[in-house]
Amino acid sequence: MTKRTRQAFGLTLLLLAGCANSSPHAQTSPPVTALPPSHPASSGLPNPPPPDREFRGLWVASFANLDWPSRPGLDTAQQKAELTAILDRAALLHFNAVILQVRPACDALYDSKLEPWSEALSGKMGVAPKPFYDPLAFAVAEAHQRGLELHAWFNPFRVRPRDDKTPAARNYVTAAHPELVRTTGNYQILDPGDPRSRGWSLAVILDVVKRYDIDGVHIDDYFYPYPVKGVYRPEDFPDGALWERYRKQGGKLTRNDWRRENVNTFVQLVYASVKKEKPWVKFGVSPFGIWRPGHPAGVAVSLDSYGSLYSDSLNWLTNGWVDYLSPQLYWPVADKEHSFAALLQWWSTQNTRNRHLWPGMKMEDWPGFTEDPAQETAREIDLIRRQPGASGVTLWRASSMMHAANGVAAALARLYAAPSLTPASPWLGNRAPGEPLVTSRKSGRDIFIAWNSPGGEPVRQWVLQEDLGGHWKTEILPAAQTNRLITATPLPQTIAITAVSRVGNLSPPAVFAIPR
């Protein structure tokens, strides 16, 4: 037991037994007794059931102030209050992960030496929050304090629109590295075909991986630009010089295949680089929900992300270049031309490497359909839970959860009534923490428990389980919480503490009985 834990025990015992000396009824205080130590499974004590596993992710978008901050120009206290309100609601509803957009368009919602502060914060690009704080460091600490994973969400190639009226910061990419930027229509974008652009975005991502205790790196569906009728066609993307250089160097791919290979190269590079720096940090992508029209059969001609965005998301999944994929299935079940159920099943059958499949869903109204958002959310989560190969969901977006008018929050409270761990990622390592070291004391009807790790594999969370007469109550606690005062009546018969590693591996449970 560490010095800090011993001090905590001493303080708690004083509170339970000694501090009552100032009371006229101190002589009636119950004695404090040490409980027997925890026992291994061979002792005959019942082992707790395995905790539930389901990814429950929530996108928090900063682009155009969609979710957070709600508007530019909020002061530091207001920004912190809004973010903690989102995290509090997510924890209350038993979400277990938040995907926070930290690089909307080559700008930063964190203290970066590479790119300027986002105008989503102050309303002016390059201006730090006042009073100063680092939003990402704050978000990581507050998320972990609530037992939530924090995934940092990057847009790797998007640059702000050409007609943006606010001035760009002097170190913004359009001024500092104009050679990397392509302009077409109103789009400005880093060219995925330029190795310097891929290297720049990779450097930005790795800077965050190195400096922040994030749980995941997340990129979305913006690679080459989305086509806009009458404004932009994919064949008009201005990469002719790079394409000609590729051909002169002996390249044999068609231009479309070359563009797809540029994106493939970036995805593979991000995955390998993140793993080299911190093997436990998950890498996920949320591509457009349809790989290609006709896959599966019956899916109508819609945007061809393979042919227009040059996004070969199936390739990333089947090659294991992602730890999770969240295809954006933003259609209601009733949409026969873009069947949610059919797409979910198709993606599941493609997941041959058993990576995490956490489909993206939206909790909003669907144009052209009359589905109730709360009922549709429940229906789609039920389909995902019954689909082999899928193990959770990523929900678009925080504002829909925060506004209770459409009933989504109430529906989620029912769907997520019990807490759940995120699924384990065994391909990222099989080491588990050692069995927790537990000390407990009983004073009257109260039980004080304290625990810590024996060392070795770091702990990200704890699972506290209480046997209430054949029914086990489960709580998932943050790593920093290492004690609990149990005052319930009746007291549990057995208590178990299990440590959870950063990739979701479980320690043996420390199990002990409560004397009756």
Image (spheres, rainbow, N blue to C red):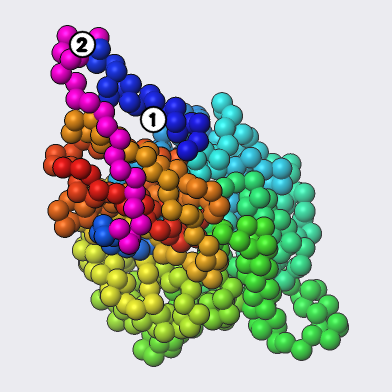
Q: Residues within 10 Å of mark 2 (few under 14, many from 20)?
A: few
Q: With respect to residue 450, does 462 lie above or below?
A: below
Instruction: Find disc 2 in the rendering and name its residue.
Output: 23
Q: Residue at x 66, y 50 (%)?
A: 210
Q: Residues within 10 Å of mark 1 (few under 14, many from 20)?
A: some
Q: With respect to residue 339, does 181 lie above or below?
A: above
Quick one: quadrant of the C terminus?
top left
**Labelled disc at residue 168:** none
Q: Which mark is first along the chain, 1 or 2?
A: 1
| Residue 166 appears in view | no
Q: Residue at x 55, y 43 (%)?
A: 136
Q: Which residues are magenta?
A: 22-43
Secondary structure of the residue carrying numbered label 1: helix
Residue 239 horizontal side relative to residue 405, left or right: right
Q: Are marks 2 and 1 in contact (CB under 8 Å)?
A: no
Does the magenta run of residues contain 35? Answer: yes
Instruction: Find disc 1 in the rendering and name its residue.
Output: 9
